[in-house]
Image: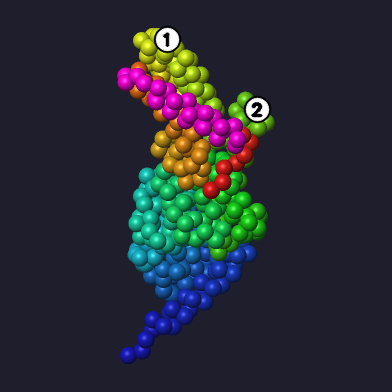
Amino acid sequence: MPNDAAPDQSAADGYVQRAQLLAELGRYDEAAEELDGALATDPGNAEALTMLARVHLAAGRPAEALPVAEAAVAAAPGALSPLVARGFALTDLGRWKAAASAGDDILARGPDDAYAQRSAAAILAGARNGQPALNAAWRGVELAPETAQAHLVLGLVAARLELYDLAERAYREALRLDPELAGARHDMGVIRLEQRRYAAALEQLVESAALDPAGGGTRRTVGDGLRELVVHGAGWSLVATVLVAFLAPVAPGPSRVLAVLAALGGALLAWRRAARLPGLLDTVLPGLFRTDRGLALAVCVVAVAPALLVLYALAGGPWPLVAGITVTVVAEFIVLARTGHHPRR
């Protein structure tokens, strides 16, 4: 019995190769026609379906890309590339819930796959799923530290979360590893589709955040907000703790009342400053502990210092005051020493 599968596969491969060459020249419509020819020969060809979806994405046609990507997923259930194409299409169509689900599926299928982690991170970031996206981006960097795309995705995710210090450092590292990334947003074709998407999205995010809303001409980063939080919160606690310490020997009772009032005032001040930093607890601080533990600890001091004043009011003794003065001085020193300096990983 003759085997017709091999000739059909060979013919389909020829269509796919021609389509890729045309796509790299930016001739997306012609590439799509070649892939239609491949699918007429071999309707279940997962490679042709995936490339056709990527061609539509490259041409800015996510509505056409989605059903093709879904067909590719059905044709190759265990493959990552069709899932990534489907996730990109859902993100471009603004279907955030479905895109987030697609990103989660990719993460589950490739926990130790760098491509899966960075692709899922980009999809989750596009679907506005902050902390999972940041975790996946970091995982992608850990799995492939010498891959420029991994750092590029980390920069993209960080920029979406307004962690501009981290975004800038990640982008610089990506450029160090692949200097051609600087012009990636102008690339054509499907081979560098992900790279082009990530670079273009990152540049748009950075450009949109380049000027502050007041028109002052300077970028206000989350790092700036964190440093202000530490300077004002720790500064208040330091002054209050020193006053309580001076009062304690001569008037223990009033000093405890002052400690409670100062703690409440410091907590209120810190809360108002923290409210200006959306996602501080669930997104910003976890990422900061990965990138700059010193600044992260300084931020935590802002919460601990009022608690030490309350501890003194309840238990008395010099040690809560000594500890409060010590930690606030250290926090202030950390921030003042890093003024104008981007944290290092």
Q: Is residue 191 magenta?
A: no
| Mark seen at residue 88 | none
Asked whether residue 150 appears in the rendered view, the answer is yes
The colour scheme of the drawn protein is rainbow
Foreground mark, 1 or 2, reads 1
Q: Are marks 1 and 2 in contact (CB under 8 Å)?
A: no
| Mark seen at residue 250 | 1
Figure quadrant of residue 26: bottom right
Amino acid type shown at disc 2: Gly
Image point 49% across, 68% down: which residue?
Answer: 35
- Density class for disc 1 (Cα within 10 Å; few <14, some 14-19, many ≥20) is few
Q: So how many labels did they put on this image?
A: 2
User: What is the CA distance from the residue labelled 1 to the residue labelled 2?
Assistant: 52 Å
Image point 48% across, 63% down: which residue?
Answer: 52
Main SS category, magenta section: helix
Amino acid type shown at disc 1: Val
- Density class for disc 2 (Cα within 10 Å; few <14, some 14-19, many ≥20) is few
N-term-proximal mark, 1 vs 2? 2
Considering depth in this image, is 234 or 157 the residue closer to the camera? 234
Considering depth in this image, is 83 or 170 the residue closer to the camera? 170
Q: Is mark 2 on a helix, strand or loop?
A: loop
Image point 41% across, 68% down: which residue?
Answer: 46
Q: In this view, does 228 lie above or below 249?
A: below
Where is residue 174 shown, x and y percent of the image? Answer: 59, 55
Q: What element carries label 1?
A: loop
Considering depth in this image, is 62 or 177 the residue closer to the camera? 177
Q: Is 336 placed left or right of 135 in the picture?
A: right
Image point 61% across, 59% down: which residue?
Answer: 177
Which stretch is magenta?
314-338
Q: In this view, does 312 lie above or below 118?
A: above
Residue that sits furthest to the bottom in the current view: 1
Q: Mark 2 points at which residue?
A: 215
